[in-house]
Image (tube, rainbow, N blue to C red):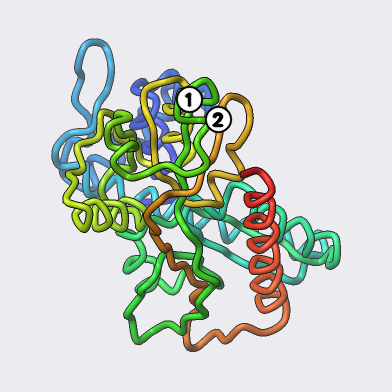
Amino acid sequence: MNLRQLRAVQAVAELGSVSAAADRLGLTQSAVSRMMGGLEAELGVALFERYRRRLILSKHALQFIGRAERIVSEMQELQSSARAIRQGRSDRLRVISVPPFLQQVIPAAVARRIRSNPQLSVRLDIARRVDLPDWINRRDFDLAIVGLPVDRPEVNVHPLPPVEAVAVLPRAHALAKQQRISLRQVVDGPLVAHSSGPLMRFELDRALATQGLQSAPAVEAPTAWLVCAVVRAGAGLAVVDPLTAVAQAGSGLVVRPLSEKIVLKYGIIMLRERPLVGEAAALAQAIEEEMAVGIKALRLEQ
């Protein structure tokens, strides 16, 4: 088993055909077929089944392909690190974050540090709360920005200033003229909400229960920016974190404070064996400063 075989299987799994995988990898179809055949012979199982002129993963291959994708990703990260060193970028950080911080806060903070330190290189990845234990177990990050609480002995937590959730609604909506929006009005909107899992959905459901309201979204979406896009299209109203709100405000979307307070707590976590020093500490400070800039911009928007 080798990396070329894993890349070939990954490409076929994604594209559904040997010919498309060969085009992507710059190989002949016969070469890709040989790599797949050799790997299947070594494993003793068929990795693909044919369905309507496409190749789909067999039931035996589902767990294997997930591990293969992680191996390929880690090898690509190793190659990126080597290239960064050759280019004189001696400082390299891997940062994972929940989506709200990836729209404006972290890009702005990273840009500041890159301008300040041309030797810095950064890899950014999305971190879902459900995946955080795996990230921690693999020790595969330098900084992580996540919803709190996080109760793991392997990490230290630096809490960020708490923020309050806000309502978002189409600019043409009748409620857009109000200074504040109630949770009942959002629910009657109809409600557009995060899928179950993110901190925002958990805190929204808890706030609705406190008010004797039920969470029955007309539309659910995995990220706040997609929630905002659905609201902008006119499907309903939503409650989102303020960092997403400031990034999505305008272009047909307005932001209003909620009548009921929903507090969201985020923090920067780092592995205990990797304390924040040097560029990691500088980037953490830049993230906190850019977060403050975003919240200030939101107040002006409202």
- Mark on residue 129? none
Crowding at dot 2, Cα within 10 Å, few <14 / some 14-19 / many 20+, comes out as: many
Quarter holding residue 167: top left
Quarter holding residue 222: top left
Quarter holding residue 153: bottom left
Tell us which disc is closer to us: 2 or 1. 2
Q: Position of residue 271 (x, y in %)?
A: 48, 81
- From the viewer's perspective, is residue 192 above or below residue 147? above
Residue at x 37%, y 22% (from the top left corner): 235
Describe residue 103's horizontal placement relative to residue 237 as left or right. Answer: right
- From the viewer's perspective, is residue 4 above or below residue 219? below
Query: Which quadrant of the rendered structure holds the C terminus?
Result: top right
- Mark on residue 22? 1
Q: Position of residue 230 (x, y in %)?
A: 42, 27
Crowding at dot 1, Cα within 10 Å, few <14 / some 14-19 / many 20+, comes out as: some
In this view, the residue in front, 227 or 72, is 227
Residue at x 51%, y 30% (from the top left corner): 176
Q: Secondary structure at mark 2?
A: strand
Q: Position of residue 266 (x, y in %)?
A: 47, 67
Residue at x 54%, y 72% (from the top left corner): 160
Q: Secondary structure at mark 1?
A: helix
Sequence-wise, the earlier of marks 2 and 1 is: 1
Which residue is at the far front?
Answer: 178
Q: In this view of the protein, can residue 296 be seen by the observer?
A: yes
- Mark on residue 253? 2
- From the viewer's perspective, is residue 118 above or below residue 197? below
Amino acid residing under circle 1: Ala
Residue at x 54%, y 25% (from the top left corner): 171
Amino acid residing under circle 2: Leu
